[in-house]
């Protein structure tokens, strides 16, 4: 079996393309998917670097996102059959976890494909039935794969946890990342006015092309919270989406209106920051943390994708054997949207 793998932790040199891995066999309640496309996320870079407590069996197949065709099923699996075109929910939950029946199974001890579990950047992957969703016959595998992790994350954060409503205003800090490019579209679909902080004029232009109403170029406005405050008549926005973390949360708090909320699903610039508690309690600001999403949110999001209402932004497509180059592109911020590997 061909696959893009990590041979250890480190820099791009540990990303390898191998052709002699054993193909997995489906067990009871599982299906084997012949993968047609996989997609990268920032998570892949963090897994590659490693952290204390992360123990992987090398070679470790990368990527959380994927789509393909079912080619074999295990005993007792009846919802899917060989030949079904499917996309993959990247959240893994233990089959005996009570959270599976709560509808919020992401609020338990989850795992993610490509992180603690073997990932999607391989010819074949075996998955439980709950991780699969049938695709329309003519839908592009790459687009379905690119939508997965960022889509369920953004949908759960904005709609389920954030309770975004029509008529509200949203500030999205950062334009080019996968979660943010999807968040722009979800916020517009929900009927919100969307402000975006971009790192360059080009990324601001790209954000406008996918639905941003107002963009602020932080190269020209490093104190972008002041600019945002003026643009909103000194009110601020109802909702801030900040996945950057330490470098931006101070300004994000200042950009939030009295009684507003800040949604956090990541911290690409670091996790620790100095918090002015007075800004929170005197202005009634709510901080909302969120990670991944339950399967029902994955389904709700993908239905909008299949209907053409939302679209994963793909910056580049590469063959599987160029996985190392794909990680370089992602790490160097050379792309707007997702990096897709075609298997």
Image (tube, rainbow, N blue to C red):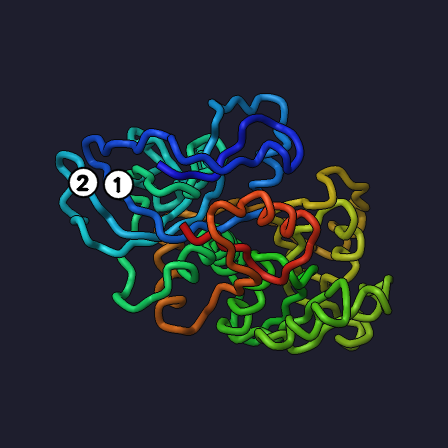
Instruction: Please identify the quarter of the rendering in which residue 246 is found.
Output: top right
Quarter of the picture holding the N terminus: top left
Give the percent coordinates (x, y) of residue 313: 53, 65
Instruction: Tell me if residue 248 comes above or below residue 94 in the rendering.
Output: below
Question: Which of the 4 image quadrants contains residue 212?
Answer: bottom right
Q: Is residue 205 left or right of residue 200?
A: left
From the top left corner, tell me how far across and down residue 267 is, in percent: 67, 45
Q: CA distance from mark 1 to mark 2?
A: 6 Å
Q: Is residue 78 left or right of residue 172?
A: left
Q: Which residue is mark 1?
A: 32
Residue 2: % across, % down: 39, 39
Q: Does the rendering let one see residue 72? A: yes
Nearer to me, 25 or 296: 25
Task: List x then y, in percent, for residue 230.
Answer: 82, 74
Closer to us: 292 or 262: 292
Decide: is 255 above or below 12.
below
Q: Is residue 203 left or right of residue 44?
A: right
Q: Residue at x 30, y 37 (%)?
A: 126
Q: Which residue is mark 2?
A: 73
């Amino acid at each position: 079996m061909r696959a893009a793998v990590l041979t250890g932790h480190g820099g791009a040199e540990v990303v390898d393309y191998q052709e002699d891995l054993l193909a997995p066999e489906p067990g009871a309640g599982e299906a084997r998917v012949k993968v047609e496309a996989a997609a990268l996320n920032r998570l892949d870079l963090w897994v590659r670097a490693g952290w204390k407590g992360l123990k992987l069996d090398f070679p470790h197949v990368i990527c959380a996102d994927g789509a393909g065709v079912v080619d074999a099923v295990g005993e007792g699996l009846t919802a899917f059959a060989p030949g079904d075109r499917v996309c993959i929910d990247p959240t893994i939950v233990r089959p005996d976890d009570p959270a599976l029946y709560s509808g919020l199974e992401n609020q338990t001890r989850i795992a993610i494909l490509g992180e603690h579990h073997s990932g999607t950047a391989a010819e074949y992957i075996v998955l439980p039935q709950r991780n699969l969703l049938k695709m329309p016959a003519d839908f592009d595998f790459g687009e379905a794969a690119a939508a997965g992790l960022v889509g369920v994350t953004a949908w759960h954060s904005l709609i389920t946890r954030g309770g975004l409503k029509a008529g509200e205003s949203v500030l999205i800090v950062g334009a080019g990342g996968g979660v943010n490019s999807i968040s722009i579209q979800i916020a517009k679909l929900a009927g919100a006015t969307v402000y975006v902080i971009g790192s360059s004029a080009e990324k601001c232009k790209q954000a406008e092309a996918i639905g941003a109403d107002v963009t602020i170029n932080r190269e020209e406005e490093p104190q972008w919270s002041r600019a945002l405050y003026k643009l909103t008549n000194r009110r601020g926005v109802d909702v801030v989406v900040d996945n950057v973390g330490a470098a931006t949360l101070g300004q994000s708090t200042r950009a939030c209106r009295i009684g507003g909320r800040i949604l956090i699903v990541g911290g690409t610039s670091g996790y620790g920051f100095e918090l002015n508690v007075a800004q929170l309690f005197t202005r009634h600001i709510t901080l909302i943390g969120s990670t991944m999403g339950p399967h029902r949110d994955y389904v709700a999001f993908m239905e909008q994708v299949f209907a053409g209402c939302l679209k994963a932004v793909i910056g580049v497509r590469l063959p599987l054997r160029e996985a190392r180059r794909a990680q370089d592109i992602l790490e160097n911020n050379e792309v707007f949207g997702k990096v897709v590997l075609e298997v």
